[in-house]
Image (cartoon, rainbow, N blue to C red):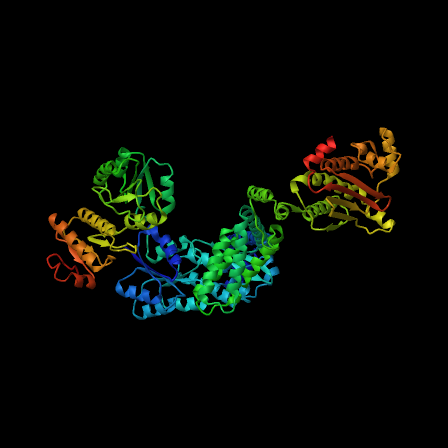
Amino acid sequence: MRRVLIVDDSALVRASIQNALERFGFEIGHADTGEAALARVHAGPWDLIFLDVVMPVMDGPTALRALRASGDTTPVVLVTSVSTAAVVASAIKLGNVQYVAKPFTAELIASLATRSLRLDPASLPPPPRVLIQHGEAGLPARLARLLPPHVVIDTSAGLAESLELTELHPYALILVESADDLEEVDAMAAVLRAAAPTAGLFAIADGGRADQPWAPTEALDGVLPRTLEPALVKGFLYGLYVRPLVTRDGAVLRVGGYQGPVAHHPAYVAAVRRLVLDGCARAGLADLVIDLRHLPLAPDAVVALVEDLDDTLRRHGGAPGFRLSPAATAAAAGRLDRTLLLAA
Amino acid sequence: MHPLIRRQLRKAFPAGVPDGPEIAALAAAVGEAYAACEDDRAQLERSLELATTELVGRNQAMTLILDHVGQGLVTVGFDGLLGGQASRALHAWFGPPAAGVTLWDYLFGHEPELAAWLQLGFDSLRTDLMPPEVVLAQLVRRLERDGRQYRLEYLPIGAPPTRLLVVVSDITDEVALQRAERAQAEVIAVIERATRDRHGFASFVRETDRLLAAASAAAVTPADLRRHLHTLKGNFGLFGLGGLAALCHQLETELVDVDAACVPSAVAPIAAGWQALHDRVAGLLGLSGPRTLVVDWGEYQTVLTAIDDSDGPWAARVRRWGLEPVRAHLERIGEQARQLADRLGKPELAVVITDDGTRIDGDRFGPLWSALVHTVRNAVDHGIEPPDARLAVGKSAHGELALRGVRRGADLVIEIGDDGAGVDWAAVAAAATARGLPHATAAELHAALCADGLSTAATADELSGRGVGLAAVRAACVELGGRLELDSARGRGTVVRCVAPLEPPRATNLHAAAG
């Protein structure tokens, strides 16, 4: 998973750059000062950095000079608004620096990323898909307005059609709107869960709560209110289920990508667990490295997740290797000796 | 034998050219070959000449095209140097380009910062630093010079591109038109919004005035200024004032980026924009006057009934709230008269309005005002003479319309007076005779003038149209329990006077009158 760091003191600008990059499925990090950016760069490698010029605490050019002085050559796109041409020209001399002026278009940001990361536009990952089974007419359109444009939304009128669709496409998220009582929806969901084991699976029904969408039952991950609040769709559903959280690169499963504020959210842990297990099954268990370095979890939560994964994998006869950050390793000291195998 | 061959033979045989058939055959063969070469050369010369002529023609045609397009066209290498011919428009706008001049020096010599950006763009193109489409999209696109505004477009030439065609268009008029249209749309949005929600709009206006004053204060802190701007932006957006909202947004962005000591004077363009808008709509929306309160009509009636029941001294005062100032009606009529004069191509009308603050029941007097429109039309169309006729009798070229609305006892008196030619009573008498109407006394003549359809019988210009109007006005007066009076002196003008009771006659009085 390519990692892109967006550094700007305006959350709005960060969000619009991130939006322009959503369809690539990068793991995206944010920083709001040059200082915070340097800290994030030292914590782990990035493939591309969008760097605002004017920021409090430490401005872009200062951060860039510090970065290059430390030998880091990560490609940087300077994001400028009121800066002078001289400032930009001297930054360019530091090497591997491009620039884009605010206000920018999503296309320009995408062009810059494509070129810097040498992406072949033809080899973009297939767009994520969402399946919505519903009887309420306006629901898919409402959902479409709230999700980024690259997400494909398929609709179905009933369980039989939904099952057919799950055979045709992998789904990141399945939503089942129903007026029936939840037990019946749960029974229906159990069938869908078997057909699409990695998808987030939610009912849209009366009694769903936007502040508590994660309420797992036998098969369902939770129940959503019919109103489909923007924060619920854009943050929770998109961030946890539609955006890539786990990618496979040869024998390495990389976990990351989650941007939400509550990284210890059980929904996130559950989603990662499901995706990693599925990834292991697809990859074959021998010599698999699970790269958890970018797992945005508190060390305690990492430990719990690793224990859980380890147990499960061993039950299935695998001998997984985990790669943990020093902090997570320290937190796990004495508790994971049986399972920890730090990959080189 | 060709002289050249003869000379060469002599050189080869200094002792004398041997006279043999071989030599003659050789000379002939060389001669033929030479002639053939000569033909080829002539052919080539002709082709070259043709090609040159065609090229010159094409160049002339190209120059002709370049000189006749309204846009400025020139090609530029990635080194920024202007190439070939620039179209005449560029010469006219920015002077002939000096040899070896770069695009940024030629266009932006007066703005070093923009010149530096353009140069940076070309440097990026040349060094292949960024995707060309990203560089092209970011090249400087606007140019302001000598009070004109230009749009710059850059079209890559060649695949892969090695030069750019730069197209410069003068968009000064386009920009002005867009600005005017936007301002117009905003005024309409404001009026719609204000009509829908008068209270909300009034408080929006007060809030905006307050915020702008606070934001312009010398002692404002950066945090406060940003907060004020943000609120202003939201409010402007809410009321459809996109232009002002954009100004706030721009300043907000600049302040965030600069993060230095803020300059309250930066708010000046927003304040000026707001003031301009305020001035345009203030009169229309009654914003310039004192604060007003809008009360639901049903509520008003309920309160009035309650006060009436208690028979207190306040009933009359509250009833006045429901009445309309007579001046507003007179002003409306005056405006109609001015528009009419304008439409009829008459000199601008002087309208003089007199009132004593009397307020009237709008519903009760509605039909009378409608009827008075005819009177105004008569006065403007027929009463007031053409300028030359007026000047001939020592009047000013433009007519004067005197509109008066005052209280006299329990009556409202409305007068529409003009300083025109006055009524031609002889013509009225003649028309009355034709219709068999009595016309011996002044009162009878007045009655005849107000008779329905009298004017259609009369052919005199002075009278045409007047009869129907006066008949309608008289009917409206009578309906109100009042009367119509008419003063007219030949050459000095006409006053139409409606006298009608302000309050409807009491039912008992009506019965008494009927009895």
Front residue of B26 and B494: B494
Q: At 81% across and 50% down in the image, what residue appears?
A: B397
Q: Is residue A344 left or right of residue B217?
A: left
Counting the numbered discs, the total is 0
Please identify the residue farthest to the top as the structure is shown: B436
The x, y position of residue A228, in whole percent, is 35, 44
Relative to residue A185, is residue A30 depicted above or below?
below
Q: Is residue B459 left or right of residue B90?
A: right
Quadrant of the image containing the C terminus of chain B: top right
The x, y position of residue A283, in whole percent, is 18, 48
Front residue of A275 and B304: B304
Q: At 45% across and 69% down in the image, what residue appears?
A: B260
- Mark yes or no: residue B149 visible: no
Front residue of A35 and A110: A35
Instruction: Residue A38: name its quadrant.
Output: bottom left
Relative to residue B301, is residue B141 depicted above or below?
below
Q: Is residue A139 left or right of residue B210?
A: left
Q: At 35% across and 56% down in the image, what residue appears?
A: A113
Q: Is residue B327 left or right of residue A340?
A: right
The x, y position of residue A314, in whole percent, is 11, 50
Relative to residue A57, is residue B454 depicted above or below?
above
The x, y position of residue B172, in whole percent, is 59, 56
Front residue of B369 and A328: B369
Q: At 32% across and 71% down in the image, what residue appears?
A: A69
